[in-house]
Amino acid sequence: MVKSASDIVFRKNELRKLKFKAIRHGIWFRSLSRIDRAIVDLTIKVSRGVRSSTLAKILYAVVRKVENTLENRFLQALKEFGFPRARMASFLAQKWGNAFARNWAYDISFAKFLAIMHINNSVPLRL
């Protein structure tokens, strides 16, 4: 069990993955401040692992920011796209004679699948 942020070990590869994921989802520049981005970048460049408890606490706060933003985006897509599309697919399949499709409208896994597909397809390509 983690007692404090200083007990968490941040490794170079983990921070690199976090940065890549944040950039890919458009969070890196939108949700993180310039200083947060600089701290992560410098930590990746300078060290192999974090030993300082102060730096670990700061990095922990940045990681939480990224995770919260990703989670909020997913929940929004689930509410606004996943469940309405699941109901629509259920209605159409029932109309075509599929009796089992009635459960699709209330299937959380199906709604999550539709929301994830929407998120992955709706991210604009930036060149």
Image: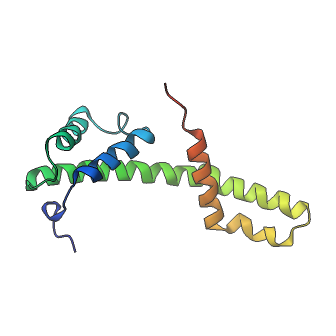
- The front one of 83 and 7 is 7
Q: Where on the picture, by quarter, is residue 7?
A: bottom left
Horizontal side of 117 relative to 27 (left or right) equals: right
Q: Is residue 82 left or right of residue 45?
A: right
Q: Residue at x 86, y 64 (%)?
A: 94
- In the picture, measured across the screen, residue 95 lies left or right of residue 28, that is right
Q: Is 76 drawn above or below residue 4 in the view shown?
A: above
Q: Position of residue 13 (x, y in %)?
A: 28, 51
Q: Quadrant of the N terminus?
A: bottom left
Residue 93 x/y as whole percent: 84, 61
Give the farthest residue toward the top. Answer: 127
Residue at the image point whose x is 17% and y is 49% from the top: 58
The chosen color scheme is rainbow
- Residue at screen point 17% across, 60% down: 5
Residue in the picture at 84% in, 57% down: 92
In the image, is residue 4 above or below residue 70? below
- Res 11 quadrant in image: bottom left
In percent of width and height, residue 97 lies at 91, 66
Numbered-mark total = 0
In this image, 103 relative to 98: left or right?
Answer: left
